[in-house]
Image (tube, rainbow, N blue to C red):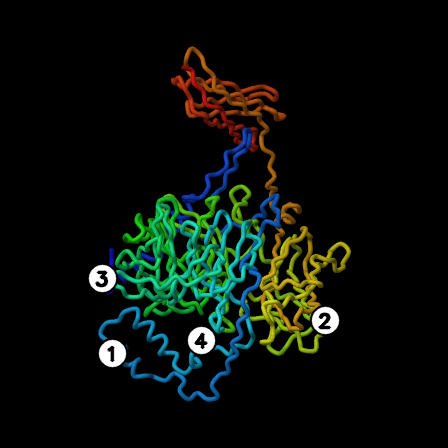
């Protein structure tokens, strides 16, 4: 165990390791990522047993530097897909109109405190955090954290904490942090597609909720603990947690963790180091252990640095500590980089005990989502900050995370969600997504990414009915949610046409709305129609009609029957609160891989497999167990067939159409457990592999 004082000494000893760590970082990342990619999900559900006679496919790995093109998955039900950011209903609207100071008097003023810190012979990460604030002197208004003008009111939610209650996932979050009362909304889902808002009687910053028996406990930043009989309240105050010496435990970013053995833990701190204690599950206000350091700031690790480009070695403003468990392994998640930056990200370490020493699992790559095709450190699309890992009842490892926009203020944020895996060494990896994904619990051939591209981004093909000064149509397709197209004030029929620069089969779109001004509430709903240009008739045809919509949306995701087109037209017909609205980003998802295959530029993936009917049966002969395998060539030509079992293999050449390849394999045992056999068949360049099962048998 490491105390806070030990952690300070440990920081000094790491200085000599910094150059070595930096030198190994690039090579280590490549090796580690390949290790992560090689693993399956620990704690995730095993693949469903394959039906008798099901063909098994193989995938070729793609090396770094040679990314494979996306290929659309067959048979996708687009109604089972989502895309990031998630469209949460009833998100809080924060209004923070701020005017800049009229002169530069006091801007960038150097204070005595800054000079004092710079003169210190040794620094802690707290000094780095203090320097950051002092360096912004005059840039921010009194009581404000960020230098912004607060041009418009904005919807926001962040710091997500998930709780699984009997198969229903509840999600708690901070609101805008700029209002007198924080967001009181929690959300629930059973399918990760439809989110139901619940208005609670209490709203906290960075709330965390845990269920212990039939009671629910909630805590937040520098608050007492609260108790309720349901996951959405009503909440009543339980009291402040207290350390063993009687001192009040008042901290930021508290997160509960209930272990499978019924023991309760708390992870906390806003700023390094991240600490942990054990709590009494019958009364969580009672702290049972001395605090220990679980995760501390390491300036040699770039992902932990503060800043948009990870330029600040001084500190990382570490926060969002969360303990979770996959299988028998404990993980601690920590967030770093600053919630006002799109380099806001998360990393994990693991341990075999809840309050033990946390280290990097072999092959672990931090930050989460870093990979060969990411745009780290400025992970604009998307980024993944303060959030929550949870294992659902089906064994899916879900990562809910904060998705930063940070235009109106640093607290303008959204929800992101993706699935993760744990490899054989315990390394955890998540593919952060910004295109349609099958919701957790749904996959096709082991894949959740449905293979569609965003076909409307920066195509240099757009037309609008008008635009306000400085809000040109370019900004609705520039991969940024911090900019937007806005129609002119006198435009009575706001229209945006996005051209793709190519024909595509499209089947989904996401409209990130931008509400203008400070007069709207969370109930404001946008009304619109979406059409596509039908190529054959050279006319606009309907895709989506929301002209009578009364449901508020922030990042509205719509799916429709697949159509071939080269452009879409969006018409804004009004809003329920008569608010001017623009488009922060219009994302249209599609593919023309199918078109290219149809026109012979790529070979078809629909290569006929060799048709073979396979049967397997366990039999008793003279008190011994045997496995009989029969493969009937139901194709139209002679085939080479190989029968493979745990007890041997046998190959047959030129098995004629309509004939069998048959063999009985001796097991040299008098009893068998249920098992599987594999049969491969080949005719020229065509091939297939088929599995069949046999039942358990006793010959005694």
Residue 336 coordinates in the image, percent (x, y): 38, 64
The answer to whether mark 2 and mark 3 are in CB contact below 8 A is no
Answer with mark 3 or mark 4, whichever residue precedes in sequence: 3
Q: Residue at left 54%, top 44%? A: 443
Reading the image, the residue beneath label 4 is 146
Reading the image, the residue beneath label 2 is 493
Mark 2: few/some/many CA within 10 Å (<14, 14-19, 20+): few
For the C terminus, the image quarter is top left
**Which residue is at the front of the view, 491 or 519?**
519
Answer with mark 1 or mark 3, whichever residue precedes in sequence: 3
C-alpha gap between disc 2 and disc 1: 62 Å
Reading the image, the residue beneath label 3 is 6
C-alpha gap between disc 2 and disc 3: 65 Å
For the N terminus, the image quarter is bottom left
Mark drawn on residue 119: 1
In the displayed structure, would residue 380 be above or below residue 214?
below
Mark 4: few/some/many CA within 10 Å (<14, 14-19, 20+): some
Q: Nearer the viewer, mark 2 or mark 3?
A: 3
C-alpha gap between disc 4 and disc 1: 26 Å
C-alpha gap between disc 4 and disc 2: 36 Å
Identify the element where label 2 is drawn.
Answer: loop
Residue 529 coordinates in the image, percent (x, y): 70, 62
In the displayed structure, would residue 298 be above or below residue 54?
below
**Which residue is at the front of the view, 631 or 615?**
615
Q: Nearer the viewer, mark 4 or mark 2?
A: 4
């Amino acid at each position: 165990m490491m105390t806070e004082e030990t952690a300070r000494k440990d920081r000094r000893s790491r200085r000599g390791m910094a150059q070595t760590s930096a030198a190994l970082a690039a090579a280590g990342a490549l090796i580690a990522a390949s290790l992560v990619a090689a693993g399956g999900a620990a704690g995730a559900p095993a693949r469903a047993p394959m039906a008798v006679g099901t063909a098994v496919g193989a995938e070729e790995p793609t090396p770094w530097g040679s990314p494979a093109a996306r290929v659309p998955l067959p048979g996708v039900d687009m109604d089972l897909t989502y895309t990031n950011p998630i469209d949460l209903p009833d998100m809080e609207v924060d209004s923070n109109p701020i005017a800049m100071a009229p002169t530069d008097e006091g801007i960038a003023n150097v204070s005595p405190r800054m000079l004092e810190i710079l003169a210190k012979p040794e620094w802690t990460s707290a000094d780095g955090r203090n320097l950051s604030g002092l360096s912004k002197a005059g840039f921010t208004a009194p009581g404000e954290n960020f230098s912004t003008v607060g041009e418009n009111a904005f919807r926001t939610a962040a710091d997500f904490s998930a709780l699984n209650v009997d198969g229903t996932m509840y999600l708690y979050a901070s609101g805008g942090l700029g209002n007198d009362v924080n967001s009181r909304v929690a959300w629930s889902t059973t399918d990760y597609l439809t989110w139901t808002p619940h208005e609670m009687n209490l709203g906290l910053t960075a709330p965390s909720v845990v269920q212990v028996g039939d009671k629910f406990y909630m805590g937040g930043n520098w608050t007492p603990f609260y108790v309720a009989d349901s996951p959405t309240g009503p909440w009543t105050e339980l009291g402040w947690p207290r350390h063993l010496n009687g001192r009040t435990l008042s901290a930021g970013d508290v997160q509960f963790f209930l272990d499978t053995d019924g023991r309760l833990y708390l992870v906390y701190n806003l700023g390094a180091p991240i600490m942990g204690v054990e709590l009494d599950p019958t009364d969580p206000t009672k702290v049972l252990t001395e605090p220990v350091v679980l995760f501390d700031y390491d300036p040699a690790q770039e992902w932990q640095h503060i800043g948009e480009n990870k330029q600040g070695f001084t500190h990382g403003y570490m926060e969002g500590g969360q303990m979770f468990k996959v299988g028998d392994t404990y993980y601690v998640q920590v967030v770093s980089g600053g919630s006002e930056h799109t380099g806001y990200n998360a990393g994990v370490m693991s341990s075999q005990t809840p309050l033990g020493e946390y280290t990097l699992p072999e092959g672990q790559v931090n930050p989460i989502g870093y990979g060969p095709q990411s745009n780290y450190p400025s992970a604009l699309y998307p980024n993944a900050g303060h959030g929550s890992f949870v294992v659902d009842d089906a064994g899916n490892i879900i990562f809910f995370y904060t998705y930063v926009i940070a235009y109106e203020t640093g607290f303008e944020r959204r929800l992101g969600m993706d699935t993760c895996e744990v490899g054989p060494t315990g390394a955890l990896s998540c593919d952060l997504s910004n295109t349609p994904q099958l919701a957790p619990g749904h996959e096709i051939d082991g894949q959740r990414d449905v293979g569609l591209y965003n076909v409307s981004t920066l195509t240099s093909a757009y037309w609008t009915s008008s635009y306000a000064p400085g809000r040109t149509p370019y900004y609705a397709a520039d991969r940024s949610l911090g900019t937007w197209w806005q129609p002119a004030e006198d435009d009575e029929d706001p229209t945006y046409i996005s051209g793709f620069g190519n024909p595509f089969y499209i089947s989904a779109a996401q409209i990130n709305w931008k509400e203008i001004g400070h007069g709207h509430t969370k109930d404001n709903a946008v009304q619109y129609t979406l059409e596509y240009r039908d190529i054959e008739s050279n006319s606009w045809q309907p895709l989506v009609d929301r002209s009578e919509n009364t449901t508020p949306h922030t990042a509205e995701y719509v799916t429709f029957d697949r159509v071939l087109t080269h452009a879409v037209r969006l018409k804004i017909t009004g809003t329920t609160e008569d608010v001017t609205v623009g488009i922060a980003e219009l994302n249209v998802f599609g593919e023309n891989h199918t078109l290219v295959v149809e026109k012979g530029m790529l070979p078809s993936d629909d290569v006929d497999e060799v048709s073979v009917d396979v049967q397997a049966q366990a039999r008793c002969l003279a008190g011994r167990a045997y496995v009989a395998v029969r493969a009937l060539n139901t194709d139209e030509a002679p085939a080479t067939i190989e029968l493979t079992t745990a007890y041997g293999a046998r190959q047959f050449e030129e098995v004629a159409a309509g004939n069998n390849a048959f063999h009985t394999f001796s097991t040299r045992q008098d009893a068998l457990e249920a098992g599987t056999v594999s049969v491969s068949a080949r005719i020229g360049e065509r091939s297939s592999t088929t599995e069949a099962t046999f039942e358990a048998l006793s010959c005694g």
